[in-house]
Image (cartoon, helix red, strand yellow):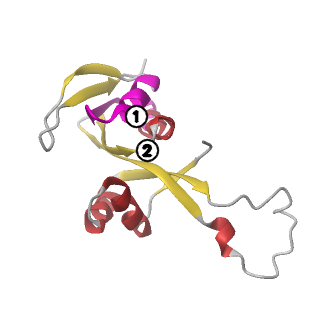
Amino acid sequence: MDVEVRDAVEDDAETLGAIVDLPTDVLRNVVHDRTVRLAVAPRRDPGPNADTADRAEDDSSDSDESVHGFVAFDVEKGTVHVTQLAGDAAVAERLLAEPVRFAVSEGFDVALVVPESDSDVASAAAAAGFETVGTGPTFDGEPTTKYRFRPD
């Protein structure tokens, strides 16, 4: 799936909350407190002549987008921490490129904790060059695995 990545804004909080089953207020705080990037795809293809079409009527539905996942991350003590990642394996891998790109430019590592049941994110982490570094904390009774990306 071809997606574009953009910065999240406060108006995205409800959609993000629905993706990860958390209240909108919680995700609004995430958008304010962290770097949050969305994977989006247009809902409809405007066609090959969209750039030359007469736009006499307002057709704002062409700019509607569908959110396919998101990543939230922040930096603490020289490490980029991915705090949330949602999307299928391909989308999650694309989204992981965002904190990795930042970390490489700053000379930081990237840390990621993945619930054992989230095989899409685990696959994305491996494909993006993350290494398993041990067991992580238990969240809501579910074991997790710690991953780390170290720039060369």
Q: What kind of residue is marked 1?
A: Asp
Residue 99 rendering spot, x and y as whole percentages: 41, 38
Left or right of 110? Residue 1 is: right
Front residue (pair 64, 76): 64
Disc 2 residue crowd, few under 14, some 14–19, many 20+, Cα 10 Å: many
Quadrant position of residue 19: bottom left
Quadrant position of residue 26: bottom left
Quadrant position of residue 45: bottom right
At a point 52% along the width and 53% down the height, the residue shown is: 6
Seen from this angle, which residue lies furthest top? 152
Q: Tell me the quadrant of the picture where the C terminus can be found.
A: top left
Front residue (pair 39, 8): 39
On the question of residue 131 being in view, the answer is yes
Residue 148 rendering spot, x and y as whole percentages: 31, 25
- Residue identifier under label 1: 120
Magenta residues? Answer: 102-127
Residue 23 rendering spot, x and y as whole percentages: 26, 65
Q: Give the tally of numbered discs.
A: 2
Q: Tell me the quadrant of the picture where the N terminus can be found.
A: top right
Left or right of 6? Residue 51 is: right
User: Residue 108 colored magenta?
Assistant: yes
- Residue identifier under label 2: 87
Front residue (pair 26, 120): 120
User: Residue 138 colored magenta?
Assistant: no
Disc 2 on helix, strand or loop? loop
Left or right of 69? Residue 24 is: left
Seen from this angle, which residue lies furthest front? 117
